[in-house]
């Protein structure tokens, strides 16, 4: 059973949570409480947003930023463990 | 050797719950390489197209479209002079290298990371400029997620150059470098 580190939790729940809130959560709110979403002849959706689109962008962007920082941290902080996909055969000197 | 129904068990915890499930080994490897090839060709084609039609001019994007968007402050400084000259080379060459890395499975995680990085700019700037008129779930968003998944799981050892790189002394003796391959 693999356990999550604090960094894993921040990336998974913090980063992923913000992306999901921005894309799905606010999207559901817009569907339920926002104005109608008529689709124009060009396939464009024109409507007044309940949550400002700029704010929605920043929520998603913050999620991506956390994911990106986690990736950099992961490379900088510790080498991969043996027995994982990344650490297979690391330092054994033998055949994989 | 695995048969087509060979499975591997994933056992972990998520949101405080025991999460255990089985994955078909051959199908996991199959989908990893399919995602890598399609995502890689996406970037490789975009890069080669720009190189074939050289010179590439990104000023309409970094100077025009990006202005006023959430990523504008990071991008517009590259809209003139040396910054623009750098961008005009970095975007096509970056896309070619990212595409090659993914298609060939070489330095796969590095390529996927920078693919997601580059796609983040396209996603927000194209989306905000167009008023998100086609919704927030666009091809660029799915690209970010696919590149993120490849960078997380790694796919370069499936029919890729990274399978060879992983056995070299350089990568064996420097475990941290393993994060750069897939």
Image (spheres, coloured by chain):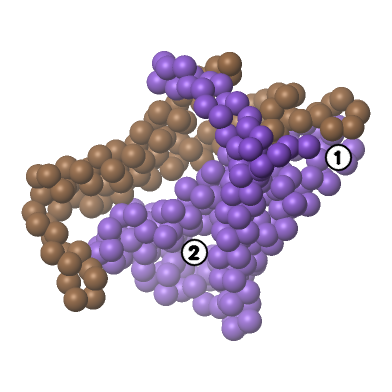
Chain colours: A brown, B purple
Indicate the position of residue B124 as horizontal and vertical percent values: 37, 56
Indicate the position of residue B51 as horizontal and vertical percent values: 63, 77
Image quarter (top left, top right, bottom left or bottom right) of the C terminus of chain A: top right
Which residue is labeled 1 in the image?
B167
Q: Nearer the viewer, residue A61 or A93?
A: A93
- Would you place residue A57 above or below residue B63 in this image? above
Q: Nearer the viewer, residue B82 or A49?
A: A49
Q: Residues within 10 Å of mark 1 (few under 14, many from 20)?
A: some
Question: Can residue B107 be seen from the camera position used here?
Answer: no
Marked residue chain, label 1: B
Q: Residue shown at 59%/77% (left/top)?
A: B49
Q: Secondary structure at mark 2?
A: helix
Q: Nearer the viewer, residue A54 or B158?
A: B158
Classify residue A19 as left or right of residue A39. Answer: right
Marked residue chain, label 2: B
Q: Residue shown at 48%/55% (left/top)?
A: B143
| Separation of marks 1 and 2 at Cα, in angstroms | 40 Å
Q: Residue shown at 63%/30% (left/top)?
A: B8
Classify residue B174 as left or right of residue A68. Answer: right
Q: Are marks 1 and 2 in contact (CB under 8 Å)?
A: no
Which residue is labeled 2 in the image?
B78
Indicate the position of residue B106 as horizontal and vertical percent values: 74, 52
Q: Residue shown at 38%/45% (left/top)?
A: A61
């Amino acid at each position: 059973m693999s356990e999550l580190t604090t960094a894993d939790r921040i990336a998974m729940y913090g980063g992923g949570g913000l992306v999901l809130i921005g894309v799905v959560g606010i999207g559901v709110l817009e569907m339920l409480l926002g104005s109608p979403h008529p689709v124009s002849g060009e396939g464009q959706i024109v409507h007044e947003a309940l949550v400002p689109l700029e704010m929605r962008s920043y929520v998603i962007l913050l999620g991506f930023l956390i994911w990106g920082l986690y990736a950099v941290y992961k490379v900088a902080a510790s080498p991969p463990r043996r027995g994982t996909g990344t650490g297979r055969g690391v330092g054994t000197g033998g055949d994989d | 050797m695995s048969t087509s129904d060979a499975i591997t068990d994933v056992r972990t915890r998520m949101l405080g719950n025991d999460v255990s499930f089985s994955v078909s080994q051959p199908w996991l490897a199959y989908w990893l390489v399919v995602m890598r090839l399609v995502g890689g060709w996406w970037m490789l084609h975009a890069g080669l197209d720009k190189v074939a039609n050289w010179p590439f001019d990104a000023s309409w994007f970094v100077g025009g479209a990006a202005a006023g968007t959430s990523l504008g402050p990071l991008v517009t400084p590259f809209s003139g002079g040396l910054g623009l000259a750098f961008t005009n080379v970095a975007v096509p060459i970056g896309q070619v290298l990212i595409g090659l890395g993914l298609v060939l499975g070489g330095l796969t995680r590095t390529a996927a990371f920078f693919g997601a990085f580059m796609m983040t700019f396209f996603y927000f700037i194209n989306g905000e400029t167009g008023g998100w008129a086609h919704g927030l779930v666009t091809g660029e968003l799915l690209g970010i997620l696919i590149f993120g998944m490849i960078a997380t799981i790694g796919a370069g050892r499936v029919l890729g150059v990274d399978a060879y790189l992983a056995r070299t002394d350089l990568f064996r003796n420097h475990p941290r470098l393993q994060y750069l391959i897939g």
